[in-house]
Image (cartoon, grey):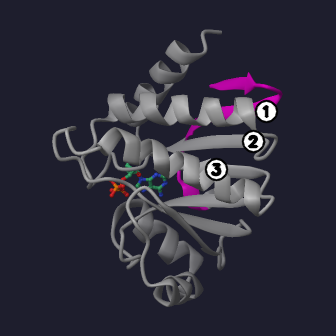
């Protein structure tokens, strides 16, 4: 599913983000930047030890914030590690922190002139953020950014499973009817 927002592409695809060829691959990291499971584990195992070595040097990243490293062996220039909120019922600033993940990653991409970027569904795995709510926040934040900034020019959300893909399709269709 694809939409054009202020001349820029916003696309949803189902797949494995480690196979993407883009300037920036976003990782759903933890605040210590220590390789974990899920998409984080997949990015570190496909990208090789160089990514982990840079993560160790950085030492950590706050929730809602984004830190950049090399992309190692991935077909990308940079990995942008963003730290999603752990779902604690919704009353602990989760929505604003999740929006901040997408915004800070897009701001970092713009600052580093990374023209194409791929995101996974941040916080909806082990961090248990309800996917319908997370999808609405992700879509709204990305659309707002594309409306107001020239770079990145292409944003892709790479969704791993059918239910997650369906939730994002619904959110994008609601935000930008065809
Ligand atoms: P979090 O800790 O932020 O919840 P997870 O990695 O547990 O992060 O899950 C985030 C999302 O990433 C989930 O929808 C999960 O299915 C998905 N995911 C796992 N592996 C990959 C992959 N290789 N490519 C894209 N998405 C992935």
Question: Which quarter of the picture shows residue 137?
Answer: top left
Q: Per the image, is 13 magenta?
A: yes
Inter-mark Cα distance, 3 to 2:
11 Å
Mark 3 or 1: in front is 3
**For the magenta stretch, what is the residue range?**
1-18
Check mark 3 vs ligand 1: CB closer than 8 Å? yes or no: no
Residue 178 position in % (x across, y down):
65, 9
Residue 90 position in % (x across, y down):
22, 38
Disc 1 target residue: 8
Q: Is residue 131 above or below residue 117?
A: above
At x 74% / y 69%, what residue is drawn?
A: 77
Disc 3 target residue: 106
Residue 57 position in % (x across, y down):
51, 90
At x 71% / y 65%, what residue is drawn?
A: 76
Inter-mark Cα distance, 3 to 1:
13 Å
- Residue 53 in view of the camera: yes
Which is nearer the N-term, disc 3 or disc 1? 1
State the residue in front, 136 or 100.
100
Do labels 2 and 1 touch, CB within 8 Å? yes
State the residue in front, 76 or 144.
144
Inter-mark Cα distance, 2 to 1:
6 Å
């Amino acid at each position: 599913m694809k939409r054009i927002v202020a001349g820029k592409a916003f696309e949803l695809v189902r797949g494995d983000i480690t196979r993407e060829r883009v300037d920036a691959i976003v990782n759903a990291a933890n605040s210590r930047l220590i390789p974990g499971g899920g998409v984080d584990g997949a990015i570190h195992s496909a990208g090789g030890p160089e990514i982990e070595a840079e993560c160790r040097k950085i030492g950590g990243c706050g929730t809602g914030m984004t830190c950049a490293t090399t992309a190692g062996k991935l077909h990308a220039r940079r990995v942008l590690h963003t730290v999603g909120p752990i779902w604690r019922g919704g009353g602990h600033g989760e929505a604003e922190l999740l929006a901040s993940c997408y915004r800070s990653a897009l701001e970092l991409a713009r600052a580093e002139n990374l023209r194409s970027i791929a995101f996974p569904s941040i916080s909806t795995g082990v961090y248990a953020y309800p996917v319908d709510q997370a999808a609405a926040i992700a879509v709204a934040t990305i659309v707002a950014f594309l409306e107001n900034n020239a770079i990145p020019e292409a944003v892709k959300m790479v969704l791993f499973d059918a239910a997650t893909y369906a939730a994002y399709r619904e959110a994008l269709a609601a935000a930008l009817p065809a």
